Image (spheres, rainbow, N blue to C red):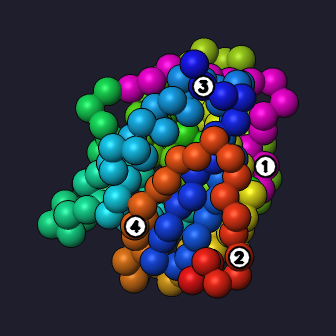
């Protein structure tokens, strides 16, 4: 059984981002994210989609291989998880949500961080419309997220420079983040 909250310290080539994960509200999503993180699944993945005024997306294992660039954004862990929509958890600035294929219950490993309020991504009770369940929020390092999302990008919204997730560490207590640990 998960505690009510978990914390993820994501080290990237742009700096450190700390996430609070809503384990009580979204237990399957958080358990999946935590397991993938602990297994090192995310180590070396790139942020493959950044759209200023919208979001920054990562979590695709195909982004570890530059030769697969034409397929970035299509990879996953080899399975999907059910969507966990919770009333009151909205795609607001700083929240973390599951990415999917556009159909319900197709999330796996890809996730994004909202850099503005994107309430149009919230669940709307239409079973034909996939939305993006929120499972956490940034509690430190939003400046890093803003730097990532505002990086120069190509016509497919891929950053021109490699912005890589180096590691994600999971803890039951919020980590102590100091300015020196942000670099």
Name the residue at 53% across, 47% down: 170
The residue that disc 1 covers is 92
The residue that disc 3 covers is 2
Name the residue at 66% across, 58% down: 175
Image depth: mark 3 or mark 4 in front: 3
Q: Earlier in the sequence, mark 1 or mark 3?
A: 3
Image depth: mark 1 or mark 3 in front: 3
Residue 166: mark in rendering: 4
- Please report the bounds of the magenta region as a residue range: 80-93
Q: Residues within 10 Å of mark 1 (few under 14, many from 20)?
A: some
Q: Is residue 155 visible?
A: no
Q: Is residue 138 magenta?
A: no
Residue 110 picture location, percent across and down: 44, 45
The residue that disc 2 covers is 178
Residue 106 image-quadrant placement: top left
Residue 177 picture location, percent across and down: 69, 69
* Quadrant of image for the C terminus: bottom right
């Amino acid at each position: 059984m998960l505690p009510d909250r978990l914390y993820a310290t994501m080290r990237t080539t742009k700096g450190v981002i700390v996430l609070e994960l809503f384990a009580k509200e979204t237990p399957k999503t958080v358990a999946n994210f935590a397991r993938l993180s602990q297994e090192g699944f995310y180590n070396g993945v790139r942020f493959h989609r950044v759209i200023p005024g919208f979001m920054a997306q990562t979590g695709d294992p195909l982004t570890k291989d530059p030769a697969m660039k034409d397929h970035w954004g299509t990879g996953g862990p080899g399975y999907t998880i059910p969507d966990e929509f919770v009333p009151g958890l909205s795609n607001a600035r700083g929240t973390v949500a599951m990415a999917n294929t556009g159909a319900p219950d197709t999330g796996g490993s890809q996730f994004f961080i909202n850099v503005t309020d994107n309430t149009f991504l919230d669940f709307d009770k239409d079973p034909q419309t996939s939305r993006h369940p929120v499972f956490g929020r940034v509690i430190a390092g939003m400046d890093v997220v803003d730097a990532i999302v505002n990086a120069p990008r190509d016509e497919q919204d891929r950053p021109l420079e490699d912005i890589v997730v180096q590691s994600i560490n999971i803890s039951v207590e919020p980590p102590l983040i100091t300015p020196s640990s942000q670099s």
